[in-house]
Image (spheres, rainbow, N blue to C red):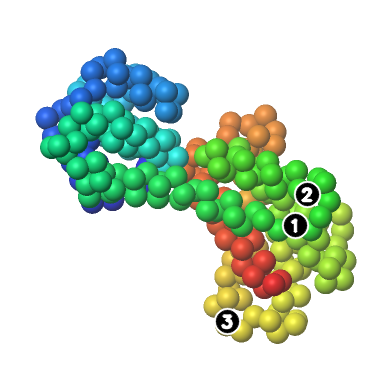
Amino acid sequence: MATLSFIDKQTLENVLEMGSGYVLDFTNRSFQEIVIDSTGLDIYSEKYQDHGTSKANLLRSFWTKESNQTVSKLLFAFSYYWRNIMVVPMRGHVNPESKFYKGLLIIAERLRDEISEHADAIDTNFGGENFDKLRKIIRELIESNKPDEAIDRLHTYMIMFLRKLLDKHKVQVNKNTPLHSLFGSYKNKLMQAKIIEAGMTEEILKSSIKLLEKYSHVRNNHSLAHANEILNYNESLLIFKVVASTIEFVESIER
């Protein structure tokens, strides 16, 4: 589900002229084609007909069912069509730089960037070809809006990341030590060095140990690590964000 606020939806309703059930000046065929070209999805499938079959209702259903990245691709396609194809013959009557058009671009850009920004956490470079390949795969999966596929690779990344850090701090661990125990050892090192100042931060780190234990269960039973049925998009994204934020905090400590 795309994260559109009430104001976002009203802006889209206005700029796309959806009040009468239409979307801009698209015919049924051209509307179907622009959605397929930009997202690879058929807007006329039964999936989007729960609110009716008008173009406006199909689009309203589309943005409640599809991800931020998918909806952003379609909004960028609409913005290009609105400004460069539909409005060109009417420049004397419609301002192509109107606040509605700018609002459309702002919404499209925000939806596009909302998931990609979390890939920035996967930016530590300890060196080594395997580590670099893993970072690249994770970033590509996240930027392609596939957190459900990324959570397996992120688990491997997190283990490598923590092992490198513990080795740096001369903390010995067994090669079979699970993820949550690795993080526990790292947390203990921080506490011994008196780097953590707030009691609340310590509690968050303790909670992270439990969360990472659950993460290992998800990786083993709900990811492509094995022949599993993978976790749904929204839960995968939530897990990715939580783990990525933990990595960002650790990186800030190390810096």
Tell me the residue that label 2 is attached to.
131
Q: Earlier in the sequence, mark 3 or mark 2?
A: 2
Q: CA distance from mark 1 to mark 2?
A: 8 Å
Dot 3 and dot 2 residues touching (CB under 8 Å): no
- Callout 2, which amino acid? Phe
Residue 199, label in figure: 3
As drawn, 188 above or below 39: below
Q: Is residue 83 left or right of residue 244?
A: left
Q: Is residue 143 left or right of residue 27?
A: right
Dot 1 and dot 2 residues touching (CB under 8 Å): yes
Residue 125, label in figure: 1
Within-10-Å neighbours for mark 1: few <14, some 14–19, many 20+: few
- Callout 3, which amino acid? Gly
- Callout 1, which amino acid? Asn
At 75% from the left edge and 81% from the top edge, which residue is drawn? 192
Q: CA distance from mark 1 to mark 3?
A: 30 Å
At 81% from the left edge and 55% from the top edge, which residue is drawn? 127
Quarter of the image that includes the N terminus: top left
